[in-house]
Amino acid sequence: SIHIYPQKIVYLMCRYIKAYCQGLPNQQYLLSFPWSRNTNTQTPLVKSITQQITSTLIGNKYAKEDLYYDSKGRITSIVDSANPGNKLLYTYTSDKQFSVDIYGSNVLEIHNILLLNSNGQEDSSYQYNNTQDTTWGKFTYQYVSGSQISSSKDVMVSADKYGIRTTDIVTTNYTYDSNGNITSTTDNYGNVNTYTYDTDLKYNTPLYVSPIKFYYGNYVKTHTTNETGTTLTVSYTYTFDSQNRLSTTKAVTSDGSTTNLTTYTYY
């Protein structure tokens, strides 16, 4: 599948630095952002995101992304500071539909159209790349109440330029704590993710820059994954600036292989 989930910018950064994610297990893609629900009426606009990775798996990596917005505060582009030809461009058709164009060296590599449901979550998508591969996605949800998801079903159909199709169906179940934070997700492939939260930080301003709403709650303290029989825990610590905005996130894997220090600046 060529599908890119724009709510996880680190997936996109893998495209900017070709060796950035090579050798990393999938669960470590989440090292960048323990995404939080925005409980504030005014979200600070992130100006730049810098990542410094120290890893015995991939060595030391550095990436800085600059973020730009329109007059409505919607993200319009994410640009690699060192190589501006590597970028994401967002175009909004309406409040419920937008597209993301992914460029490498100023060449359009992937075009992605996304439609959102009434809760601001991904409803469907269509994507193609510059080698004539296409992917269609449909996402359905069952809710506990409001926008709190009890289960989701993702159906992805991919076809290459020769017309060969593959279908991937992922069903995920969610559990929550009494504060509405997601405590676990389990999919039909047996992948289990569990989360704990730093409740002392619940009043600090959560970082939120994606057009797609992604509900996790307070700042994640630990994220444990169990995929293909391998368990890994990522622990997070945070610092904040004088305006109570997230300044740095430090993520460390339980096996000691990888540390990721992410720094944020604001407009």
Image (cartoon, rainbow, N blue to C red):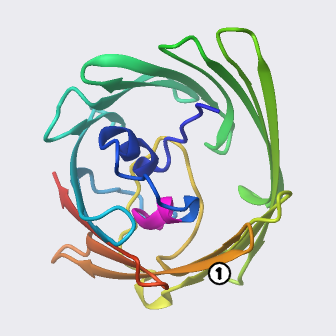
- Neighbourhood count class around disc 1 (C-alpha, 10 Å): few under 14, some 14–19, many 20 upward: few
Q: Is residue 183 above or below residue 73?
A: below
| Closer to the camera in the image, 254 or 81 | 254
What residue appears at the point 43 percent right and 52 percent down from the top-left corner? 22
Location of residue 257 in the rendering, given as x and y in whole percent from the top left corner: 40, 77
| Closer to the camera in the image, 184 or 212 | 184
What residue appears at the point 34 percent right and 41 percent down from the top-left corner? 18
Q: Is residue 172 above or below residue 202?
A: above
Q: Is residue 211 a member of the stretch shown in magenta?
A: no
Could you say which quadrant of the image residue 101 lies in?
Answer: top left
Location of residue 193 in the rendering, given as x and y in whole percent from the top left corner: 68, 71
Write down the region rendered in magenta: 28-35
> Which residue matches tag 1?
179
| Closer to the camera in the image, 50 or 191 | 191
Q: Is residue 166 above or below residue 239?
A: above
Q: Is residue 159 above or below residue 114?
A: above
Q: Is residue 53 left or right of residue 3?
A: left
